[in-house]
Every structure is written in C-alpha cells, then in structure tokens.
Amino acid sequence: MAKKVKCTECDAEFEVPDDVVVGEVISCPDCGLELEVVEIEGDTVKVKILQVSGEDWGE
C-alpha cells in the first residue's frame, strides 16, 4: 500500500513508495515543488517545502 502525500503548495494529493524515509526529498508531480518528508504516520506522509540554504560556493 502506497503512502499518501498532500502538496503544501498546490494541494495535489499523490502517492510515494512505502520505503520513503524522513528527510527524503520528493517532488510534487503537479507543480514540481520539492518537498522534504518530516513525519510518517501510518500511510500518511507529512512534508514541508524544502528550504535551500544559500550556498556561496566560495565566492
């Protein structure tokens, strides 16, 4: 049984593999937003918008 995720941006509901883990980054198939898994409760996966830290790449 696949786990369900609801996109925090566009409210699309989609499935992710059973072996998804906290900290994993997944993409919404509708809007393309990258989401980070923060909690797995039964077959429901809670996510937050992936925060990309500002890397300066040595500049």
Image (cartoon, rainbow, N blue to C red):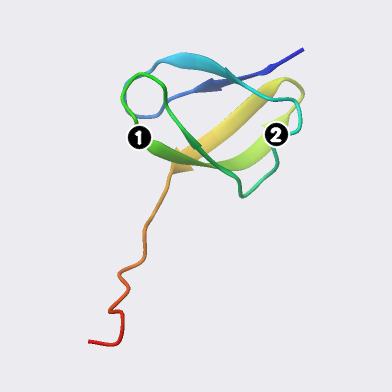
Q: Residue at x 48, y 14 (%)?
A: 13
Residue 41 x %, y %: 73, 29
Marks 1 and 2: CB-CB under 8 Å?
Answer: no
Quarter-wise, where is residue 42 in the image?
A: top right
Number of other residues with Cα within 10 Å of mark 1, as a class: few under 14, some 14 to 19, many 20 or more: some
Q: Residue at x 35, y 18 (%)?
A: 30
Q: Residue at x 52, y 16 (%)?
A: 14
Q: Is residue 37 above or below residue 31?
A: below
Quarter-wise, where is residue 1 in the image?
A: top right
Residue 4 circle label: none
Identify the secondary structure beneath mark 1.
Answer: loop
Q: Amino acid at mark 2?
A: Ile
In the drawing, does residue 33 fall left or right of residue 48?
A: left
Residue 56 x %, y %: 27, 79
Among the two numbered marks 1 and 2 on one chain, the one whose residue lies closer to the N terminus: 1
In the drawing, does residue 34 fall left or right of residue 59?
A: right
Label 1 sits on residue: 33
Q: Residue at x 55, y 23 (%)?
A: 5
Label 2 sits on residue: 40
Residue 21 x %, y %: 70, 41
Looking at the rendering, in which quadrant would you find the C terminus? bottom left
